[in-house]
Every structure is written in C-alpha cells, then in structure tokens.
Amino acid sequence: MDKRYVLSVVALVISLVHAQTNVQVQNRQIWHNYCSAAARGNLFASYQAFSPICASYSPETCCDVVAQAIRSYPDMQLCRTKSGFQLGAVGCGVDRSSTDSIQDQPEPSNFHFPTETSSPEVPVRRSEPSPTTGTVPTSTVEVVEIVFNYNPHDNVRVSIPVPKTSTIQANSGSQRPTAGQKTQNARPTGQLGQQSQNPAPNRRPTPNEETSDYDEEMPAVMVNTPGYQATEFALNLCRSIGGPNNGDSVISPLLPQLLLANLVDVANPTTKQQLLKAIRLYPEQLDKLTKSLRDVSKSSVNTVEFASVNFVAGDLKLNKTYSEDARLRNVEVLAIDFRQPNQAARIANKWVSEKTHHLINEIVSPGSVSPDTRLLLANSIYFKGKWKYAFIQTEPAKFEAAPGHGQQVNSMYQLNKLRYGEINFPDDNGLRWVELPYEGDTLAMLIFLPTQRHQLEASFRQLRPEDLARVLAELDTSYIKTKVNVHLPKFTVTDSVSLNGALERLGVGSIFHDGDALRYLSNEATVVSDVTQRTYLSVDELGTKATSVASLSIVPLSITPEYREIRFNVDQPFLVMIVDKRERYPVFIGRIYDPQE
C-alpha cells in the first residue's frame, strides 16, 4: 500500500512549567531591560551589557545566548561586574572572572555533544570557601563540577558555584532539549526579524508580570549544536556552488558532508584540519543527525532511508581501522574491478537505483570510470513525506520566472494555520517564509520568497546561519497566529553537480592535489578525483518525494491571539528547504526558477 495513504500516529507532548523564583524573575527583568523589542534597536548596548557571556558570539545573537543561559542555569544570578553582567552565585558574592565564566565556552564549530546513548558523568559536589570581599567574613559555598565534551577526544571540567538547592545536572548547559521537550518558558509569538506590533514605548512590565517579551518573543535559538553547524555547512556549500546556470538546482548538503567525514581519521594533520573546518562536525556528530532522520520512519507515515557503500578495487589494501569504522557505521564494502569500466559503472548504478527507489538510475557513466580508480565512496538518502495538511485544489496559474517572462503552471492551494515570518536584510532585501509540515511534525518544508520581487539570489546570499536558526526555532513552538493562503506550483527537479570547485572554495583543497593528504587510507598514495551529487525532488498535492546520491572517487596520485491572514503566492523564483525540526538543519535545499512537473 502507498504509504501516503496510511494513517498517522498522534503523539501527545506534555511540557512542564516550573514556578519562578525571585532570582529567575530578576534575571528576566535584567534581560528585558536590554533585549526587549523596544531595546533591540541598539545591538551594541545589549552586547556591551552582556559582553562576558557573549564574547564568543555575534551582537545579533547575544540576546538569544543570554536567554538560553539563564534558562539553563535557573539557580544562578546575573551579576553586574566592571565588564558587564555575568552569571554567578545567588547574591553575587562569588567572583566569576576566572575560567568558570560562560565566555570561556568554545566556538560553535568546536563544540561536541554526547550522543543520546552516552552516560553523562554525574556532577561532583563539594564545598569550598568563597573569597573574602572587604569586611565580609569568608563563607562556604557549594560547587558543582560538570564535564563538558568539546570534541570526542577531550573533556574539560568546569567548576560552577551554585546555591545548595541547585538542580543543575551534568552537561545541562551544553545539551539542547530532547525531541518533543520544550525549552522552559519559551513561547514566542513575534515574527522573526521584526519588532512586535504596537509596542508600548514608555512602559516596562513589572517584575512579577506573567506576560513579557522574554516569554512572548524569544524563540529558543540553539547555536552550540550539531544541527546549527550542519546549517553552516549547508549554506556555505550552496553559496560556494553559486546560482543555478540552467534553471533549477537542488542538493542534499548532508551527503557530501558525510562523505568527507569518512576521510577525517585517515587524513594527515593539515588535511584533517581543512576537513573539520569545512564540514564543521566530527563523524560521531553526523552519525547522531542521521540516526535522528532514520527514526522518522519509526514514528510517522513518512519514510527516510540512508545507505552508504565503498566500492574497492580488488588489489587495494585499506587501512584496518578505516575498514572497521566502515563496518560499525553499516557501510557496505564491495569489491569491484575498475579496469572494466562498463561492468564497474553497471554495478555502481544498480546500487544507486535500488537505494533511491529507481528515481536516480546513474551516478557514474562508463566514460567517467577510470581504470586507475582505486576507491569509489557513495551514499544516498531517500525521503517520502505526506503533508500534514493536504492541498485542497489545483488550478492553472501564472508563474513569472523572470520579469516579463510568464508561463502557465499547475498551482496547488490551501488555507491553514501555518507558521509564517519574515527576515529583513540591511539593503532592503529580505525573505518571507512559510512552513508546510509533514505528518508527525518532525520534518517540514520551508518555502522562501524574496520580499523584493525577482531578487532571490540577492536575498539568499545574505541569509546567515543565525537567520535560519531563528526560523527553525520558531518551528519548535506550538503557538501559531497566522492563517496563510498558500499557492504553490507542483514541480519536479532533477539536478547533477560536481562539488570539487565548491569544496576547494571552502578550504578543502589538499585532498584533490596532495598525495600525502589521505596518508592513512591505504597502502597507496591517492587523491580525490571527483565529488559528485545527483538529486531528485518532486512536490505534489499529497506530499513530497526526494532522494539524493553523492559519490567521491579516489584515484592514484597520478590524478498574535487573533489570526492574521497572509497571502503567500509562489508566482516567482523561490527557495525551498526540507528541514529536520528536531535537530534544526536543512536536509535538502533547492532554488526553483522554472517549475516543471
């Protein structure tokens, strides 16, 4: 039976709401003074006020970082110091100017999160004297030691002074909420990138007031997560590829990211640094993202399938550790004779066709297979999703691919309560977006339209990871204040692209030229000859089919409560993403200029 017709499972998510202490109320009031909608116009003032906490972040994300910090440490107080507010023990009697400060957290690209199956180390509690200040006698405060994992190979122990009633758990400051769990007190209602409607300019809420900007406008933006770093790589790769030359383009950034991660542990130190800087994540973190996607098939009517293979020349001796890692990651290892190009291409293409449900039937041609090829790495993703809200009708409509160049398309229509927002850029360009959720609410399609007509590329070039992180945070809230009239063309896109130039522009150059780059891969000096991706995306009234396959060839060195009704008419070039709402990153990204069925 077609899975699109199978009924979905309904899940009930219960959020826990905790009573607020006086310290939490005071922290919220301090945050509000510098980060409310009325105060947000002066980014420098808020960044300066919280500079000890925001030292490693941009001014645009500072307020979000502080909001996340005071949620993560509810029993710690924002204390004023010479350099700005920072978290300390209640009463602000503890000096946190040393290595305990939040400003010592690592850059996002270096942050590692334990996997769900790992057992976090239990916090070690001990008592120690607090420093004497003036004539105040020395007192005893309790200290909890928490282990933070900055990468899979290092642990850093941080001592944080806390009151004796603290409930801080191991690694509580470094992990995002689990799937289905809401961040405490986060219930945003404002549009992203905009101030709230009709703010009261001269009024500040009282400390005990239930409704405030902190509750109503701040989505829980996660920046120190694998999902955020996957978003960074995705946007960097798409921009490095450039705009589509002949119509539409679509890729799955996760696939080349996974392929390159396979080379991290067999690269020399210089190449390893290049790879990690470009792909942003360790292989273990990428495994966590793919596990989350695989789980979609277990909990909804949607289907997500991954597959990976290494086609190995019969006389090539692979590094034993590399082979064992491949086995542990369920990567197929198949012997192939590259000296017979027709047979080698037929075997590789058969594997691709089966894994993509016959939507993509070729990843290599006989003419592109060199007899000298030693290793061909390939991976694939297949997605079939059913809309949570099906489109109710389809009718002919006009689509303007370029100014003055209109065409007839079959446009689908629906009117529903949908999440909607806008992102504005300094040059008056911007993007409007709407969410089209799939059954199960773990995956969604985002459609972006430029606010200035026919300026998709100009707006996309300015889309930053933090902008997309704000949108993805908005998808994690249950509060929807907009009804959206959506008109979206039916379309099918097939795209093929070589990623060599894009990866070199991202700083991954040595794997293509240096015979010593993959020093520990095999008994031969080898280089990467090509990284290719082919992708298929089809959208209709019932849902979406999308699949992608990437290959990497290695050869010898010789080579508000009232609903606002919004009209969202997709009648010009648009940006489309299929996103993982739990891990918060794009799985597919496409730019559609000429929608064809």
Image (tube, rainbow, N blue to C red):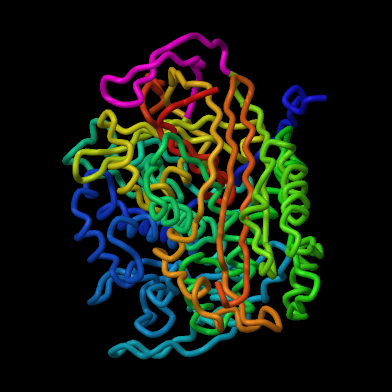
Residue 277 visible from this viewpoint? yes
- Locate residue 357, reporting x and y percent: 74, 38
Could you say which is closer to the camera, residue 510 or residue 36? 510
- Compared to residue 31, the image places residue 518 above or below, namely below
Q: Nearer the viewer, residue 326 or 359?
A: 359
Q: Indicate yes or no whether the magenta region holds residue 393.
A: yes
Q: Does 393 appear above or below 17? A: above
Look at 50% across and 19% down and name the residue there.
Answer: 416
- What residue appears at the point 39 percent right and 46 percent down from the top-left corner? 218
Which quadrant of the rendered structure holds the C terminus?
top right
Q: Residue at x 64, y 49 (%)?
A: 549
Instruction: Estimate the x, y position of residue 47 in percent, counting from the top left.
Output: 26, 63
* Residue 392 placement (x, y as % from top left): 57, 12
Left or right side of 316 for 510: left
Q: Is 395 rendered above or below residue 28? A: above
Residue 21 in view: no
Q: Quadrant of the N terminus?
A: top right
Left or right, 299 with respect to 45, comes to right
| Relative depth, front residue between 596 and 547 | 596
197 sits left or right of 235 in the view: left
Q: Would you identify the image quadrant in which residue 189 lies?
A: top left
Region rendered in magenta: 391-418
Q: Where, by quadrant of the figure, is residue 580 drawn?
A: top right
| Residue 495 higher or lower than 114, as above or below | above
Q: Position of residue 244 (x, y in %)?
A: 40, 41
Q: Is residue 13 magenta?
A: no
Secondary structure that dominates the magenta span = strand
Seen at 71% across and 84% down, the residue is: 523
Foreground residue among 371 and 130: 371
